[in-house]
Image (cartoon, rainbow, N blue to C red):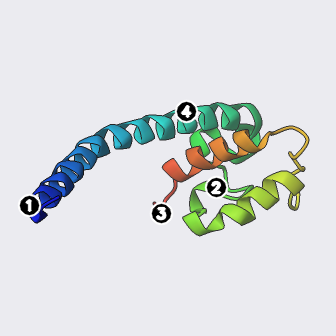
Amino acid sequence: MTRSTAKSRRLVFALAVSALAPVASAREAARDQAAIEAGEAVYNNYCQTCHGDRLVNTGQTFDLRRLTAGDRARFENSVRNGKSQMPPWKDVLSDEEIGQLWAYIRANANQK
């Protein structure tokens, strides 16, 4: 294989990969949106009563919109095991539902 042939093949490969990137991004965005919508349903079913409608609380509980991207482990621990007045949800919510709930909270967080 000559240098020009190899260079041409690399260029064609690079163009093919870059052409697929928007498709992958669109799929990822759709998957993220589906998780956010599922998380909103989980929130409305289990969390809204204490944490407020659409994540807007009355000040009596923790404002979930204050959670930052780095707070996921803390969030998951609190949801699974409970904290203060919040009961544990580990026997109620699946890992997938907790992940969906996290996606909904992060989509509506004060700090993206």
Residue tagged by mark 2? 64
User: How far apart, in angstroms, are the residues tagged by discs 1 and 2?
Assistant: 57 Å
Residue tagged by mark 4? 37
Label 3 Cα crowd, 10 Å radius (few <14 / some 14-19 / many 20+)? few
Please report contact status of discs 1 and 3: CB closer than 8 Å, yes or no: no
User: How far apart, in angstroms, are the residues tagged by discs 3 and 2?
Assistant: 11 Å
Give percent across and percent down for residue 53. 62, 38
Label 2 Cα crowd, 10 Å radius (few <14 / some 14-19 / many 20+)? some
Task: Say which element carries label 1.
Answer: helix
* Amino acid bearing label 2: Leu
Can you say which quadrant of the picture contains the C terminus? bottom left
Lower sequence index among marks 1 and 2: 1
* Amino acid bearing label 4: Glu
Can you say which quadrant of the picture contains the N terminus? bottom left
Task: Say which element carries label 3.
Answer: loop
Quarter of the image where one finds residue 52? top right
Lower sequence index among marks 3 and 2: 2
* Amino acid bearing label 1: Ser
Label 4 Cα crowd, 10 Å radius (few <14 / some 14-19 / many 20+)? some
Residue tagged by mark 1? 4
Q: Looking at the image, is 54 positioned above or below residue 5?
A: above
Residue tagged by mark 3? 111
Lower sequence index among marks 2 and 4: 4
User: How far apart, in angstroms, are the residues tagged by discs 4 and 1?
Assistant: 50 Å
User: How far apart, in angstroms, are the residues tagged by discs 1 and 3?
Assistant: 49 Å
- Closer to the camera: disc 2 or disc 4? 4
Please report contact status of discs 2 and 4: CB closer than 8 Å, yes or no: no
Residue at point 63% right, 49% down? 102
Give percent across and percent down for residue 58. 66, 50
